[in-house]
Amino acid sequence: MNSWSLSDIEVVSRAIVSAPSVHDTQPWDLRLDGGCAEVTERRGFTDTPRADRVISCGAGVANVELALRALGKKIETDLLPDPRRRELVATVRAVGTASPSSTELRLFSAMARRRSHREAFADIPVPAATIADIVAAAEIEGVRARLLAADEAPALADVLLYSADRVRQDPGHQRDLFPWTSHWLPQGGHESVDAIRPVVTRGVPDSARLAAAIESETVLVFVSDTQESIDLVRTGIAVERAWLTAVDARLGASILSHPLRVDDSAHRLARRLDVPGHPQLILRIGYWGIRNFRRGERAAAL
């Protein structure tokens, strides 16, 4: 393919814009040139951890791949293909034609329905077969999606509370941390750091209460083999594939990553779960409650 039609450009552009990103910053640029789609990292962000920005770019790559497959393209993807261009995240090449599978078309459709659900889920267990499908969708070299066992909920609770305690005296960090954990915190105890954006700074539950809330949900921990950029990109690809698979199964989901960026929180979680590698983010999944399903949420923050 030597050129892109206007409809191709629109489809691929909409796909990457719909990818989840940290604080909805969309820290990527997309360039369509010849038969290639290039995803590059936009620099200049100073208020978000780079790991989250690179993971966000990986989620964008996943959506570009899926859009091209939905357009009937056979593709090949090179991650971090040019050491001379450090901002280049991926090159996705169209190398022929191929009919998209029914699964690819469903996941492409799921992009528009993906929402970040940070409140309680309906009290309906997620079937084991559905969880297995979501974990399988996340399979990629260098990354593992690990289902949190019920008896491991206290470990995650302790790490989240440790992270919260480390930044409790820093209002700037509180703006980031507490909205990411608010779905496991009580409804009361809000106060404002400024006149515009309220954050939770009181009423944090004790470890036992928080562990009970976590245990009642389905939680996946995404662990990368290394902290290198390529494994962060792979983490983004894995989590977006998992999230879209959850949406296709009529589930809601949300991500937490900021608590794992605080000091040694990620190392503590790896040690408590006895997993090799580096925990990068947490994906919680479940069925929407009727009220939440009707209202929905504008999605895209990681």
Image: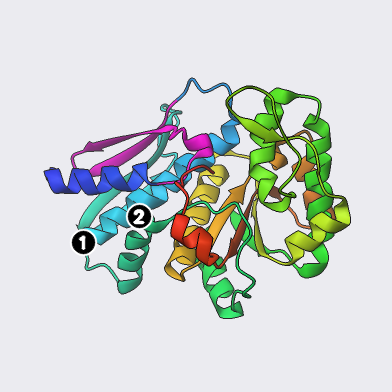
Q: At label 2, which amino acid type do we have?
A: Ala
In screen coordinates, is 62 left or right of 232? left
If you read the primary sequence from the N terminus, does the residue marked by circle 2 or circle 1 appear first?
1
* Left or right: 145 as drawn, with respect to 273: left
Q: Range of the magenta residues? A: 19-42
Q: Nearer the viewer, mark 2 or mark 1?
A: 2
Residue at 78 percent across and 54 percent down: it is 156
Q: Amino acid at mark 1?
A: Gly
Q: How far across and how far down the image is residue 5, in percent?
A: 12, 45
Q: CA distance from mark 2 to mark 1?
A: 19 Å
Residue at 34 percent across and 53 percent down: it is 65
- Residue 201, disc: none
Determine the image quadrant of residue 221: bottom right
Q: Position of residue 83 (x, y in %)?
A: 45, 31
Residue pictured at 59% horizontal, 78% vertical: 127
Q: Is residue 94 left or right of residue 136?
A: left
Q: Is residue 50 magenta?
A: no
What scheme was used to colour the molecule?
A: rainbow
Of residues 292 and 274, the one nearer the viewer is: 292
Instruction: Say left or right for 144 vs 59.
Output: right
Q: Callout 1 environment at 10 Å: few (<14), some (14 to 19), or many (20+)?
A: some
According to the picture, the residue beneath numbered tag 1 turns out to be 72
**Which quadrant of the figure has residue 263?**
top right
Q: Which residue is mark 2?
A: 112
Q: Quadrant of the C terminus?
A: top right
Label 2, secondary structure: give it. Answer: helix
